[in-house]
Image (cartoon, rainbow, N blue to C red):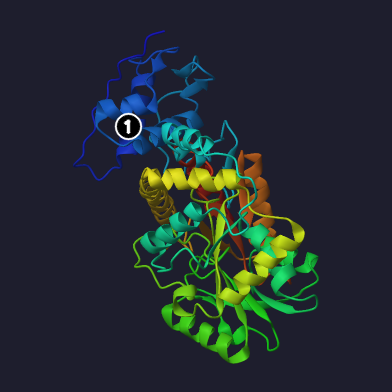
Amino acid sequence: MAETALPVALDRESAEPLAVQLADALRSAASEGRLRAGDRLPSTRALADSLGVSRTVTAAAYEQLHAEGWIAGRHGSGTYVTTTPPGPLRKRSRKPVAPVITDFVDLGTGAPWAGGLDRAAWRRAWRAAADAPPLSRPERAGLPEYREAIAEHLLRHRGLAVNADPVLATGGTTAVLTEIAVAVLKRGDAVAVEEPGYQRAVGVFRANGLKVVQAAVDAEGLLPDAVPAGVKAVYCSPAHQYPLGGRMSAARRVALVERARRDGWLVIEDDYDGELRYDVAPLPSLAALAPDVVVHLGTTSKILTPTLGAGWMVAPEHIATTVLEHRDLTGTSPAAAGQRVVVELARMGDLGRHLRKLRRELSERRALIIDTFADAGIEVLGDDAGAHVVVLLPSAEQERSLMRQALERGLRVDGLARHYVNRPKLQGLVIGYSACSREQLVSALPVLTELLRRSG
């Protein structure tokens, strides 16, 4: 069935948002019979192109009309005016009923924007990687060309000036934390971890016989004075604290490494979301400030895909040597295939192009969330970097209730409670925006906004 030409004119001088104007115009056309039951509507992309607006505008208008029952989607076919309009034209409510999501939307954290990878570049990198001859023995430190590519990446995107020598390939953050726990630290050693913090790190340390102690965080990240005496190592995420999202200030970074030197700590810097920052100048990594006491960890999991199993560690020489000895003893080494793909993506410039594209996309999604929530009077934390924001709530009961209600509406959101080892001191939702598509995010925000407003 052919698409129907839509009788729409938007006034860019009006104070009324374009999405509201578009929804009102389509609602009026359906109510007055200019759009009839069964008429097929253009896709959000096609309509955006014809009107000269962003796809966010058309998607938001369609979602509102879906929620009100004026239009409906048919899987694999398109969007149509409903056979039975919901009644006479009514002025758009300023407090609309929360729409229902037709497809499940994942607003959890930790997953990358895998849909943004250029498929041609991805295939090209794998073909080029497959042309390399098979290795006769594993490269325990990682492929030399991979280590060089990572050194260049760290210089360009993280401001960390190192050559390839101190760079070791890893199988990802969890894999290298296991190596550090087993090879560098000793059973019974105490390790301080951010509270709230990354519970997988807590699990790795405990599984390998280490004593985990908690150190408080605030809006500027880990509090150095909150680290108990007697610890052997401190694990932290200064670029974008997980999950609260704070960036460790420059003064606090200096204070942390100074205390590490004084008290003999090893600082494990998880550069979580380090490449993803918005509207703020980059701060020096802890490894750049104190390469003698800091182990810097990075991964391709959030910028490409976790399936590559490709990460890196920049460590003091004695730490790197100990890890390599452990790999020799156990016969383990990071897989070469993922390293080769990263090398090819970097060599052909596709890695840099993807990072620029990723930052643009996530920056736009971030702005969409912030603007939507601000219009509803909802405050967020942790939006300076990364791919998630936090909305604080007054009680644990509300956190659980909102997570349950969101799931009933087709949304998966994370809560703060699970990120604590001890009794949670803060309650709230952790809302990711990289795992879903842009269209899914647009459809989810009205639902989430309404749920949060009702809870307030």
Residue 369 x %, y %: 44, 51
Please tell me whether mark 1 sits on a helix, a strand or a loop. helix
Front residue (pair 81, 169): 169
Q: Where is residue 324, by image quadrant?
A: bottom right
Residue 263 at least partly seen: yes
* Image quadrant where one finds the N terminus: top left
Q: Where is residue 27, by image quadrant?
A: top left
Residue holding disc 1: 22
**Which residue is located at x 63 percent, y 77 percent?**
234
Front residue (pair 139, 282): 139
**Which residue is located at x 66 percent, y 67 percent?**
323
Residue found at the far left of this picture? 13
Residue 365 x %, y %: 42, 48
**Which residue is located at x 27 percent, y 20 percent?**
7
Q: Is residue 270 left or right of residue 3?
A: right
- Asked if residue 270 is positioned above or below residue 111 in the image, the reply reads below
Q: Residues within 10 Å of mark 1 (few under 14, many from 20)?
A: many
| Amino acid residing under circle 1 | Leu
- Asked if residue 224 is positioned above or below residue 307 in the image, the reply reads below
Residue 207 x %, y %: 79, 64
Front residue (pair 239, 162): 162
Residue found at the far front of this picture? 136
Residue 302 x %, y %: 52, 51
